[in-house]
Image (tube, rainbow, N blue to C red):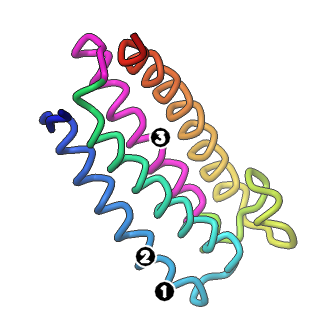
Amino acid sequence: MIELTQIGEQLIFIGIAFFLLGLIQGALIPAVKNSRMALSGHLTAVQCGMALAIFGVIWSLVVLPLSLAMFVAYGCASGFILIWLGITIASVTGASKALSIAGAGFSATVTSEFMVTIMVRTGSLLSLIACIMLVFGLLPILG
């Protein structure tokens, strides 16, 4: 039977709050400069929120040292939030260099472009590393 841990409970809360934020963002899509990018941000928040909630539910199955487990849990959450925040800022400012498909036809100041690029790349790298470590933390359930 799966039991909730303190980290698991926190991930569930963060995930559901993130999911709610994504739903609210969905209602605001028409109000921003780049609605395609806003849709991307909406979907990112909803999907990452669900992922974090699922991670929280299965967290008791993760076998990692505490410091590594905390890095994985909060690395996933922070990475996902950074990606979403970068995409959301891009939707408001028109930044497009880091996200060229959703940003096609838009541009922004050098500062906005740089900020979005740093957020999206840092969030992507952080969440990728944390999710890879999560997979290794779940390997013991196979055998």
Are dots 2 and 1 in contact, CB under 8 Å?
A: yes
Q: Name the residue type under label 3.
A: Gly
Furthest residue to the bottom? 30
Q: Which SS class for mark 3?
A: helix
State the residue position of label 3.
79
Q: Residue at x 85, y 67 (%)?
A: 104
Furthest residue to the right? 105
- Which is more N-terminal, label 3 or label 2? 2
Find residue 122 and report its image quarter.
Answer: top right
Q: Name the residue type under label 1.
A: Ala
Q: Which SS class for mark 1?
A: helix
Task: Report x, y in % for residue 74.
Answer: 33, 35
Tell me the magenta residue range.
62-88
Q: Residues within 10 Å of mark 3 (few under 14, many from 20)?
A: many
Nearer-the-camera pick, 74 or 116: 74
Task: Report x, y in % for residue 17.
Answer: 29, 62
State the residue position of label 2.
23
Residue at mark 2 to residue at mark 3: CA–CA distance: 19 Å
Task: Report x, y in % for residue 140.
Answer: 37, 12
Q: Is residue 3 above or below residue 139?
A: below
State the residue position of label 1.
27
Q: Residues within 10 Å of mark 1 (few under 14, many from 20)?
A: few
Question: Is 112 displayed left or right of 7 in the figure?
Answer: right
Q: Residue at x 47, y 23 (%)?
A: 135
- Which is more N-terminal, label 1 or label 3? 1
Question: Is 73 displayed left or right of 94 in the figure?
Answer: left
Q: Residue at x 72, y 56 (%)?
A: 110
Are dots 2 and 3 in contact, CB under 8 Å?
A: no
